[in-house]
């Protein structure tokens, strides 16, 4: 149970209960009635009078929620007018809500979670790892999955810009509700700094940040959580291994042999912490020319060689693409803005392979018989 109340005991007219029960908070993604955000709703002579209590005063979704409430109540037979009184939860009610949400998910991504956790890593910077992460997330969401992204590259955060959002999480008590862009929920340290300021933190602060992104952000029910890792094998990679030893790792490299050699080190850290390497993605894999030839600006074969050495598949070869670069600059992922672009097609294929590579059959579910 998640705290839902009987409509009569909650002060909600039975004629309005079913309609209002379909209205969902866009950030928490639960029905408003279940969240105690509608303490009363009465019907008197064709007038529906509804008390709506937002979780916080500066709720960014306030207008949308109010419009959804009006629309739902107005569709009830016999309702001629809808009056919505908007307020804010008192601290006790808000704290009770936070505790109820936490109680329903004591370990959001602990052992036994049904959320697939994929860390996107690289041995060095400049290989397009974040661009791959952002577009892969949007491609997975387009396939009907519920997707979240943690931008764990604290020193080089770029996921919000790649997904075209400057929104910040909404705080409800000591929990954060992640914003959504292109159907993907995301959180980044870039949402908590002013402008384009640098973040100069050492190991303990980096570990604590990753820990908070995992525990203090209300992600809801995710099918896939992608983690955009910083390049290399430093503190964040070690922390992720400690916090999520059951995560899978996707290694991104370029075709250049030197880059592929370095990429193997990222996979080595994953192995040392017990994580599984899913495969290798070769980015910047040649530029198609008008005559049909391919200009291999960064060489060839690096991805295949890295996959061979690691004993994992080469899951995708993503070609150089002007549209991919332009989409990143504009915050419009190429997989949605230009889905027929060769890079978009390659990333869509990667999303399809990830979705089908870990069936749920045979896995134990985190429940026990009554």
Image (tube, helix red, strand yellow):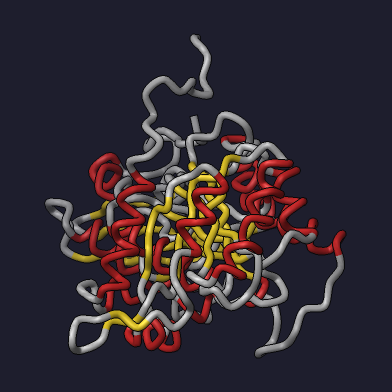
297 horizontally vs 75: left or right = right
Q: Is residue 64 visible?
A: yes
111 horizontally vs 118: left or right = right
- For the point 70% across and 81% down, the residue is 193
- For the point 44% across and 40% down, the residue is 10
Front residue of 335 and 55: 335
Question: Where is 22 relative to 129, above or below?
Answer: above
Q: Is residue 61 visible?
A: no
The residue most toward the left is 77
Q: Quadrant of residue 363?
A: top left
- For the point 68% across and 76% down, the residue is 192
The location of residue 151, given as percent across then percent down, is 60, 66
Q: Quadrant of residue 122?
A: bottom right
- For the point 44% across and 70% down, the residue is 300
The location of residue 268, given as percent across then percent down, is 68, 48
Question: Where is 361 relative to 348, above or below?
Answer: above
156 horizontally vs 342: left or right = right
Question: Where is 288 relative to 87, above or below?
Answer: below
Question: Where is 363 relative to 15, above or below?
Answer: above
The location of residue 64, given as percent across then percent down, is 36, 70
Front residue of 135 and 214: 135
The location of residue 338, given as percent across then percent down, is 24, 78
89 horizontally vs 32: left or right = right
């Amino acid at each position: 149970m998640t705290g839902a109340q009987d409509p009569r005991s909650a002060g909600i007219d039975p004629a309005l209960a079913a309609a209002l029960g379909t209205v969902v908070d866009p950030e928490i993604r639960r029905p408003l009635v279940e969240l105690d955000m509608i303490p009363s709703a009465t019907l008197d002579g064709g007038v529906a009078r509804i008390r709506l209590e937002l979780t916080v005063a500066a709720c960014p979704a306030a207008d949308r929620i109010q419009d959804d409430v009006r629309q739902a109540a107005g569709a009830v037979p016999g309702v001629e007018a809808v009056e919505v009184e908007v307020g804010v939860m008192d601290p006790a009610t808000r704290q009770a809500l936070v505790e109820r949400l936490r109680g329903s998910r004591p370990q959001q991504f602990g052992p036994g979670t049904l959320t697939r956790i994929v860390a996107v890593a690289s041995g060095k910077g400049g290989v397009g790892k974040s661009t791959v992460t952002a577009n892969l997330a949007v491609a997975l969401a387009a396939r009907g999955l519920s997707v979240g992204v943690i931008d764990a590259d604290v020193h080089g955060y770029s996921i919000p810009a790649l997904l075209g959002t400057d929104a910040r999480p909404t705080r409800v008590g000591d929990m954060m509700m992640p914003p959504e862009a292109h159907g993907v929920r995301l959180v980044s340290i870039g949402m908590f700094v002013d402008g384009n300021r640098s973040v100069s933190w050492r190991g303990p602060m980096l570990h604590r940040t990753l820990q908070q992104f995992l525990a203090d952000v209300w992600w809801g029910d995710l099918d896939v959580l992608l983690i955009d890792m910083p390049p290399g094998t430093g503190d964040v990679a070690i922390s992720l291994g400690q916090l999520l030893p059951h995560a899978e790792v996707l290694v991104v490299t370029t075709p250049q042999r030197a880059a592929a050699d370095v990429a193997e080190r990222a996979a080595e850290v994953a192995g040392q912490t017990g994580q599984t390497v899913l495969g290798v993605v070769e980015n910047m894999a040649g530029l198609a020319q008008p005559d049909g030839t391919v200009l291999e600006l960064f060489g060839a074969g690096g991805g295949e060689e890295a996959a061979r050495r690691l004993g994992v598949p080469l899951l995708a070869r993503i070609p150089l693409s002007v549209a991919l670069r332009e989409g990143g600059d504009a915050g419009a992922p190429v997989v949605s803005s230009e889905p027929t672009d060769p890079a978009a097609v390659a990333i869509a294929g990667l999303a399809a392979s990830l979705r089908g590579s870990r069936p749920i059959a045979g896995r134990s579910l985190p429940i026990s018989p009554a």
